[in-house]
Image (cartoon, helix red, strand yellow):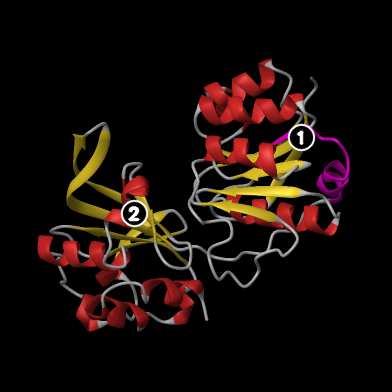
Amino acid sequence: MDEYYQAVRALPTWLAEPLLHIPPTLAGRIHELRLRTGCGIVLTLAGRQCTAETLPDCPAALRGLRLTAIQMEEIFHTLCGGSVHTHQAELAQGFLTAPGGCRVGVAGRFTERDGQLILQQITSLNFRIARVVSAVLPEKLRQLLQGHFVGMLVVGEPDSGKTTLLRQIVFALEQLHCAAAVVDERGELFPAGHTLRPAAVDVLAGVPKAAAVQMALRTLGPQVIVLDELGSLEETQALEQGFFGGVDFVASVHAAGVEDAFRRPQVRYLQQHGMLRVLVLLRGRNTPGQIQEVRVVEP
């Protein structure tokens, strides 16, 4: 069964049922499900947004549907499992993680309370379908993973398969009997109950990345630390502590290409401090998980 069908089951029944009747030939191409107050259902296929009613074989229950504020609240609370409080740390960063590891982007009106952002009113939800896509590691990349590669960045635009490729790299490290620690703050790399979760790898889930890196360095003795979406300079500086101790890292970063990646402060920091040695560039959202280039960066 395609991951789309598993993902939409997390929605309220009145919305999940018609979405489950979308034919498999179409479901397998859906990357995102966008829900907005006052609007119809919008599906993203290969980077293009389409209203549900314009797609072939659209179920009748979706035609003309315009989501009300009350319906959006119901969808939101259902995705939170009825407990918004348990997702507060995620919501303060503009997302929540649905069952199965699908990330849901959240938009609406926020307010600051005691130094923390609190969501007051939900107006938009961007439901990204998390899929297991096969990614083949080229021989050059496999050889680099066998040595002391220092720092490796997986570079790609949204939906280009960065998380998919990181998973394959983790499995390769496991096969090489490498002590790897995976920092999985949002539970997207290896969601709870994931059938392909590696057995001989240490996974730190639900912990902010910078703190998780420090935890791994202090207690797990990793040879390699793997983390998705390197964001802040704080996270980058945490990796630097591992660099001083001879611990390699693999991380991903949002960028359309190598030049765009080097414009990001955290990437410049890595380069300036001699921590970046390998760039893995993905082809793009139309061919998720496919590698365009593996480039060794001179220190």
Work out how far the residue at label 1 is from the one at label 2, CA to CA, in angstroms.
Answer: 32 Å
Q: Which of the marked residues, 1 or 2, is nearer the chain's N terminus?
A: 2
Q: What residue is shown at x 69% (from left), y 48% (from top)? A: 181
Determine which residue is flagged by label 1: 247
Left or right: 145, with 49 as reference point? right
Q: What residue is shown at x 28% (from left), y 62% (from top)? A: 83
Q: Quadrant of residue 81?
A: bottom left
Establish if 206 lies above or below 26.
Answer: above
Q: Nearer the viewer, residue 193 or 103?
A: 193
- Whether residue 223 is visible: yes
- Whether residue 255 is visible: no
* Amino acid on which the number 1 mark rests in the picture: Val
Q: Is residue 143 magenta?
A: yes
Establish if 28 lies above or below 242.
Answer: below
Q: Nearer the viewer, residue 175 or 213?
A: 213
List x then y, in percent, for residue 220: 71, 45
Q: Secondary structure at mark 2?
A: helix
Q: Nearer the viewer, residue 45 or 13?
A: 13
Q: Is residue 82 magenta?
A: no
Left or right: 79, with 273 as reference point? left
Q: Nearer the viewer, residue 35 or 84?
A: 84
Mark 1 closeness class: few <14, some 14–19, many ≥20 residues within 10 Å: many
The segment highlighted magenta reads 139-152
Q: What residue is shown at x 20% (from left), y 75% (from top)? A: 63
Q: Quadrant where the C terminus lies?
A: top right
Q: What residue is shown at x 28% (from left), y 69% (from top)? A: 52
List x then y, in percent, for residue 11: 30, 72
List x then y, in percent, for residue 222: 75, 43
* Amino acid on which the number 2 mark rests in the picture: His
Q: Secondary structure at mark 1?
A: loop
Left or right: 161, with 241 as reference point? left
Determine which residue is flagged by label 2: 87
